[in-house]
Every structure is written in C-alpha cells, then in structure tokens.
Amino acid sequence: MNTPADSVSHTPAISAQAEMVTVRAGLPWWRLLARDPLALCAAVWLAFLLVCMLIAPMFLGKAANDMNLLARNLPPWSLDKGWLMILGSDSLGRSILARLLVGAQNTLSVAFAAVVLAMLIGGALGLIAGYVGRGVGNLIMRLSDVIQGFPSLLLAVIVLYMLEPRVANLIIVLAVTRIPSYLRVTRAEVLEIRSRGFVDAARAMGAGRTHILWRHIVPIVAPTLLTILTVDFAIVMLSESGLSFLGIGIQPPEITWGLMVAQGRKHLSNAWWLAFFPGLMIMITTLAANLLSNWVRLITDPVQRWRIEAPKAAATNA
Amino acid sequence: MRGFKLHQPFVTAASVAALTTIAAMATLAPSTAYAQRTITIVLPEEPDSLDNCNSARSAVGRVIRQNVNETLIELDPNDSTLKPRLATAWKQVDATTWRFTLRRGIKYSDGTPLTPEAIASSFDKALSPKLDCNARTKMFSGFPIKVQKVDDTTIDIITPRPDPILPVRMTTLTVGYPKEPIRVMNNSVGTGPYMIERYTANSEIVLKRNPHYWGKPPQLDGARYVWRKESAVAAAMVRVGEAHIATNITHEDAKDAKTDFAYPNSETNYLRIESLVPPFNDKRVRLALNYAVNRTALHGSIIPKQAQIATQMVIPRIAGHNHALNKQRYEYSPERAKKLLAEARAAGVKTDTPIELICRINQWENTTETCEAIMAMYTAVGFNMKLKMLEVSLWNQHNAHPNKGPHTPGADANLKNRGPVLLGHMHDNNVGDPIFSMFPKYGCKAQTSSHCIPDLDKKIEQAAQTPNGPKRTKLWEETMAVVHNEALDVFLFHMVGFARVSPKINFVPTAATNSEVLLEQVTFK
Amino acid sequence: MLAYLTRRAVHSVIALTGLVIAVFFLARLTGDPTNLYLPPEASREAREEFSRKHGFDRPATEQFARFVGDVLDGNLGFSLKKQRPAVEVVLEAYPTTLKLAAVTLLIAISLAIAVGALAAYRPGRVFDRVGSTGSLIGASAPDFWVAITAILLFAESLRWLPTSGTGGFPYWVLPVTVLALRPFGLLVQVVRGAMMDALASAYVKTARAKGVAERSVIFVHALRNALLAAVTVAGDIAVGMINGAVIVETVFGWPGVGKLMIDAVEQRDFAVIQASIMITAAAIFLMNILIDLLYVALDPRIRHQ
C-alpha cells in the first residue's frame, strides 16, 4: 500500500464495476442532476432565464423602454426610485434590471436559434457526407473548409454589412459560422459507425438507407451533437457581444446583453454598473451552459458516468 | 510522503510551463526610449496616408497640417479670419484671377527653396483627377485652378469661374514637395516647423524639427503620434503619463476639470427632413417635428453641456450665422406639436404615414442614445416612427440619394419606392463660409439636398456671388432665416469635442483641434 | 504518407479557391465604396468618375475575371484606403499578430496542461473544482469588457502596467492574458477529460500493474494522451484566436492583422480584405496539415493506419 501505484489503482477498478452496475440500473437524468450541485445550479439558472424569456417582455417591456433623462446612471442597490432601479439605471434613465430580464429574450433566442440551426444543417450535411458517396461527401467537406478558413467574426461582419443588422440575419450569420464543427463530428461518427457490424447486419437484413440512418446512426450521433450544442451556445453568446462591441450587432431599440455591455463600456470609468451587470449575465449564463455541457458529456460517457452515479464510492476510494 | 511523491510530476510540469512562459516573454522586443522635449499625442484613428494631398482629411491633417505642410493662408479657428502663412498678401486682380505674394526665403526641410514652380507642381498633383485626394474631392471637385508665375515671389491663381471666396478655399490646400510622382505617399515633405522622421505603419509616426524652418523655432523638439480607438484607453494614457494629448475623448471620460478641455469642433447635428415628399411637404408637420424634440433635456445629459442648441446649419463663429434666430428657437412643446399634427390631419395630410428615423452608428458621441431618446419623443406626440441604426455605407445611400418625390434622380429602385425618411445627420463646416453648407444642403440642384424652394435657391446663388463683406454676411443670414422659418430641418446641437491635456504642457484645444494640432503652440511648463 | 500530404494539399488549394471566390463576391455585396471615399457633397459626376476609375461600374463577374488575372500575375490589388499594394499592407501587420498568437497559444497550452492534468488526477477535489470552474469563468466573460476593465484597473488605478501599445514585457501582459482566457478555459476542459480517460484506460492500468513508476506513468502514458487532445483542438483554437485578436488589437492599439481586417471591411477596402483573408486562410490550412503531422508523430496508432 505504500507504493504510489497501489494507492490509485482502486479508482479504475471501482469504476469498471460501478459502470457495470449503475448503467444497467439507469438512474433517471434528474436524479443524476441532483447529485451534481454545480450542474444543478446551472440548470436552475437556465430554467429561470427561460421563464424570463417567456414572461418578462409582457410585464417589463414598458419599464425596459421608459426613459427618464433626469434619472440617468442611477447607482445600484438603492430602492428610493422603486425596486426596478435596484441595479441602477442606464444612460437614458431606463431600469437596468428590466432591460436585463427583457433582453434575455433576444440574447438567448439568438444564441439558441443559431446553434440549433447550425446543428440541424451541420448534422444533416455531415450525415450526407458520411453516408452518401465520396463525390458529394468531398464537396461538402470542401465547403466546410471554406467556412473554417474564414475567421468567423470577419464573416459575420461582412454579412452584417451586406444585410441589415436584424435579429434574423444575426441568427443566420452566427449559425453559418458554427456549422463546420457539427458537420465534421457527424461525418466522423457516421464513418466510424458504418464500419461496425450492426449496420452491416441491418443492411444484410434488407433495411433501407433511411431506415439505417434514422434507427441506427442518428441515435448514436445525437448525444455528441447535443454536447457541442451547449458549448457552442456559450461561444455564440460571446460572439454576439463581440459584434455589438464592433458596433454591428443588433441595434436599438432591440435589447441584448451584448449591446448593453457595448453601450455601457463608455461609462466604465464613471458608472461601472451599466456594463457590469449585463457582462455578469453573459458570464453566468455562458458558465452555466459550459457546466451543463460538461455534465451532459459525463452522463453520456459510459466510462465516466460512475463519477456522478456513485459519488460516495468514488470519494472514499480516490 | 505519499502526497509529495504524487504531486512531483505536476510540480515539474508546472515548472516547465512557467519556464516556457518566461522564455516566450523574454524574446519580445525591448521598449524604445524617446528624447526630451517631445510629446506623445493619441489620435482616435490612424491616418490613411501621410501625403500632403490628403491633409484636408482630419485624420491626416491632425499630423501634418501646418506642422509639416503649410497653407498659403491660415484660417483663425477662433473668429474665422484669414491670416498670412506662406503668402503675405493677396488680392483679386480680375473676376477669375487672384494674386498672391509669397513670403521670401522659404525652404523645404531638405533645403530646396520654395518657388512658384514648386507650388504649381504640388497643387497639380494634389488636384490631379488621377488621384482621389481629399484636397480635390473636398473643395476643388469640378473647379480646376491654375497657378501662374508672375515673378519669383508672386503667383496668380486662375479659377474656372468667378470665385469671390477663393482665399477661404485656399486655406484648405497645403503646399507639398515639387515634382512628386502622381501617387499617394507616406513621406510628405514640406516647409513647416517639423518633418516626418519615421512612419511605422499601424504603429506610430514620429516628427522632428525642420532645420530650415522660416519662422521662429518652436519649443518642442518633436512629437510622436499613436492611435487608440477606445476613448477610455486614450484618456488613461494621458492620465498615467504615457501621452500628453488625447485629441478626441468622449465627454463621459472627460470628467477632470484640470486636464480635460471642451472645444467647439464646427460640427452641427440635425435631422434632415425630406421636404418634397408627403407628409413632410406640409409645413405644420415640419413644425411639429421641431416642437416635439426636447433639446434642453438632451443638453447636459446625453449631449455635453458645453454644446450649444442649434437653430441653423452653420456655427456661430462663421460670418453669416444668424444670431437673431437663437432667440426664436422652437422650444419644446408637445402640446403644440400635437395641435399642429391635428390641424394637418384635419386638412387631409396623412400624418400617420410610417416614417423611418435613420441614424448612423457612432456618427457623434451617443448617437444611438440621442436617436433612441428623440424617437421616444416623436412617438409621444403621435408620429408613426421607427428607428433604424445603420452602418456608414447603408446610411450613405440615404444621404447621397434623398427622396425628392417621384423624380428622385440616380437612386436605386428600392430607394425610390421608400417612404419618408428623417435622417440623423452631422454637418461639419470647418472652412468658414456658409456656401459649403447652404448650397449642398438646400440648393435645388445639389445632389444631397432634400429640399427645393426656388426663392431660397436664388438667394443662395446671389450670396455665393457676392464678395466677402457685410453684404455677403447679410445675405447668408437671410438664407438661415428662411430655412428656420420654413422649418426645413430639425436642428439639434452645435457640438463640442473633448481633449485631455497633460498638466506638464501648455496647450489649449481650439475649434481647429479636430483637423489640425499645431505643435508650434505646445510648450512644456 | 506522401500521398496523404498531397491529398491534403490539393484539398487546401480547392478550399482556398472557394474562399477567394466567396470573399470576392461577399465583399462587393457590402456596398459601394464611392460614398466612403468621396465627401458627402461630391457631385454625381465625381462619383461616376471614381467608380469608373476603380472599375466598380463594371459587372461583378468582369471585375472578378480581372482580379483572377491579377492574382495569377502575383498582384493582389491596391489598397483604396492606404493607396499602396494590399500585400504590403497585410504583410506589415502579420508579424504582430503571429507573435501575439504564438506567445498566447504557448502559454495557454502549457498552463492548461498543467492545470487540466492536476485537476484530472484527483477529480472532484478542491483543486479540480477551483481549477476547472475558474478557467471556465475566465473563458465566459466578454473579452472586450475584460480588456477595458483590466486597463482601467491595472494601468489607470494601480499603475502596474502600461495601458496599451507595443513594447517590452510589461506591454504584453494584459493583451496576452485577455487573449489567453478563452483558449485556456477550453483547453483545461479538454486536457482534463483526456487525462481522466487515460488514467482509467487499460494501458495505464497495465503499466501500473507492471510496477512502472508513477511519474513515468503520468508523463509517458497519460500526459501524452492529454497532449494529443490539446493538439486536436489547437487548430480550432488558433482559428478562434483571430477573432480574439480583432478585439484585443482594437482595444490595446496593436498593429495586427485582426484589426486590419475589420477596418478593411469597414472601409470597403476590397483588395486588403481579399489579401488578408487569402493569406490567413493559407496559413490556417498549412497549420492544419502541420497539426495532422504532429498528431501522427505523437500517436503511433495513427501511423500504422
């Protein structure tokens, strides 16, 4: 027991056993979530934002746009002007709290729509590239090379100069820049799965191409894509704010957090809260997405899943 | 024991990481030291070239104008009067000829003497249609001038048409080096107190003393120019002593009364009305647009308090600015705006026509905030308005092709069929004569004019042909009054810029600081 | 191996051609530069003359044909803004960005391997929690916001570091740190994951069972895996770094190619956009091939395939 090698050798052994037992037991995902406090917090935060997205514009839409030039840049943590001003007011005297909650809708729907669009297009192209003949596959891969050769921020800037900076255009631009990662992963997985026995078996039993694609390949590829989706969600949110910094993202009167940070940065030296709170929202939300993505990766990975399912065993043996 | 052994590999790994970091950092270039009595100036953007022919562009002018390349005549930024520089006297000989007497004994920084031929050659290059130099496109487009030598210190400038204000025009044209190739360069040579020592593209420009300068040697040995896009960074550089002057910072960053100066920058912002299309062709609607804007609320909040509420296109120091109008301002009155709109509606004007308020991103400090606020004010009195913030190129399409009704010339089909637009705009007349404002904005024939009132058009033409003097001034004042009374545009503010100046030096920013920074006026305390 | 390299090179050339076509037409769709290069009051004749002189009045296909001809002659065009050959403008800006990216990448990778490996060694413990969450927090903040705040804090208030610009060691601290945050956050995750897989893998178990010293288990077996994982994503990270460089160069006033590209789009300086993207893309493709080679060198299993 004194040699270093001995002291750690338990862990993998336990893991293998744990895997055998618990994966078969198949704890439901919410019980797994409850066992990981960080991932749980992340999920709760994202759920809270989802609620904001749906109801905040209805109740706070007016408060978010009501300006008062006599109450500009009010500092936070004061209830004198009502609870809406608890986080202070912006350079036009609008409630920062209301704008954050209402802005959640644009910010999150842009990011969400962009990654889902990228996943659907990238995934579909990846399936085709991997499953259909070489010619089409090659063509698709070269297209993906072209997008990857383009620095994504620059592509977005060019397209937004070409089109007007509307929400829909922003979603399309951000989606296009994210397509290659889904495409490559899907294709790689499809190529790998195709070489496995069960696909050959299915084909031998007379299953059609679409049947094999939908029943055998998609279910295996999907979890990986979902993991990328959560990571990309974070990347896209940050890209959106970067575009606002460069002055070409979504434009007022629309509200997004990125736009709020970009507009507030002029006041960083005298009214820090204008840029701080929206920046914090972006940071927390991005972090939540990343944490959740780690967790998804963990539970979908049979080798590592035991770490959540058998925390006590792991803790005592590690 | 166990813990130690286990972690040792990581300690090694971490040390390797730390060592690579240090090694990587050590290969970086060492910092450069600068001589005494030089200052560092932070500009908002890099000059696109350092050619004399582009000195009328503010980004270029801030570095070389009057420092490296001088004009024949200088414009006093405080009262718009003309002062001799390379020319000591000038007079009109006939309708199309002006005679200039040159200062004697002037040499370029390489020792070449300044001759009439040199001036002719340098102007030929700057105004050559082969180049798109700002010198030509700003003031001399379609107005080719010819330089003729009279004797060694006298030249005649011949204009294609009679031009009573040629001397004012000449204040924009700097004299460059003779016999330069017809292409834009980065090593302008001139007669000014300084010369370019080096220009490191993307990084810095250094000026040093011109040993052959004709005037009194200035105190500074030289200057270094750098550029930072973020105002906060530029301001911080002066604060911590990395730089001495930051020429353009935002008023949010200019909070220190000891170091931060406001200067009028000859810019006027306004909303351009398309007075030839409904519902803007109704005067009541145009008046309502003016009464609905609460300029006093914007003033001192989003717009710096040092700015001035505007009633006309040109700034107060320009001869022709109608001072009486400032007492007849359209004061904020939503009730009046609503009443005027109701009257227009009763008379059959479609006051609910959707109107686009189009502003250009970052055209002035807080453009977005200003336009958002104005948009809210218009909605409050009952206009059916939508705000659109556009990037410069898209905005320019609207600017260059105002909707003049069904016969809008030269516009794309999609611009022809659009509804009425209220265009957020900023006009900069730093030359000092109203002709450069009034013709392009209100002349019937001007491409960018969104108006056409035949009487006003005639008056502008008449004023343009009148020689400098009280009569010309009075005519211009009358044109300002017509524009104001007809409420053809919504004037907002005569704007100011802000500069931060290090307490170690003496320098007072002026109205010209936006387009030139005279190093000869800077001294160490 | 040679066949593989040839194939990759051919693919890269195809993609580069596609990219050039895309850039050429996309750039021209962003609008006519005439309005930006002539003063707003310029007459219609002056505008038409400008368009004619620079060929903007010709159909896009004709402009493209001329461009292709020029490129084949080795001429990447003339910068409208700088009035100089575009290649010259782009190549001047390159060294700055390359140095910045190389230093940042080196630091991000070495630190991430150290932190990620240590975190993976004792998953769930304090160091793992702090290290992996902390690196994520850094990677989750908008970079321009971090950059400006850092300048106000470390340069203006505390006066520890210079505000901006280029120069010796102190000038590199803030830009490199800001630029490294995101790749570091991502790399820590990747390395940690790979390291955990490796430590649980059969060959590490075998090595341990054979009594191989723990140090060599970690260095020779597990860390190589982590390195492999880091190399796999290094390509993506390097591409992403160009985005970061745009922001960092803009805020810190660094004369690099990221800022140049954005400015060129803003100014509709088509030749510079084309030249900078072509050179950048060529560099990216070349780097991807190098990464593949490095991958092969690190992983013997691939060599046999």
Image (tube, rainbow, N blue to C red):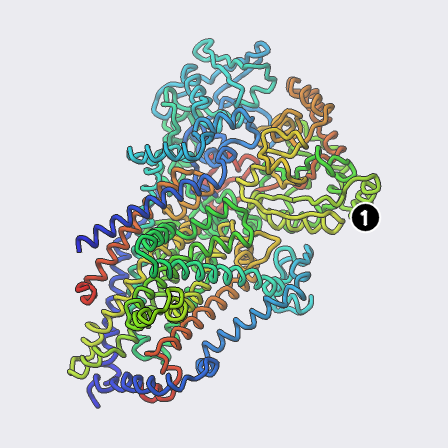
Could you tell me which chain the residue with mark 1 belongs to? B
Which x, y percent locates residue A156? 46, 50
B457 left or right of B436? right
Residue A125: image quadrant is bottom left
Residue at x 46% of width, y 48% of height: A157
Residue C192: image quadrant is bottom left
Which x, y percent locates residue A259? 54, 56
On screen, residue A188 above or below B117: below
Which x, y percent locates residue A163? 52, 46
Which x, y percent locates residue C98? 31, 50
The residue lying toward the viewer, choosing from B419 and A205, is A205
Residue B433 in sight from this viewpoint? no
Residue at the spot of label 1: B335
Residue A216: image quadrant is bottom left
The residue lying toward the viewer, choosing from B263 and C216, is C216
Residue farthest toward the bottom in the current orientation of the protein: A1
Residue B445 in sight from this viewpoint? yes
Local crowd at mark 1 within 10 Å, few (<14), some, or many (≥20)? few
The residue lying toward the viewer, choosing from C244 and A210, is A210
Residue at x 46% of width, y 22% of height: B129
B471 left or right of B395? right
SS of the residue under disc 1: helix
On screen, residue C247 above or below C116: above
The residue lying toward the viewer, choosing from A84 and A226, is A226
Q: Amino acid at mark 1?
A: Glu
On screen, residue C100 above or below A307: above
Residue at x 51% of width, y 61% of height: A113
Residue at x 34% of width, y 69% of height: A206
Looking at the rendering, in which quadrant would you find the N terminus of chain B?
A: bottom left
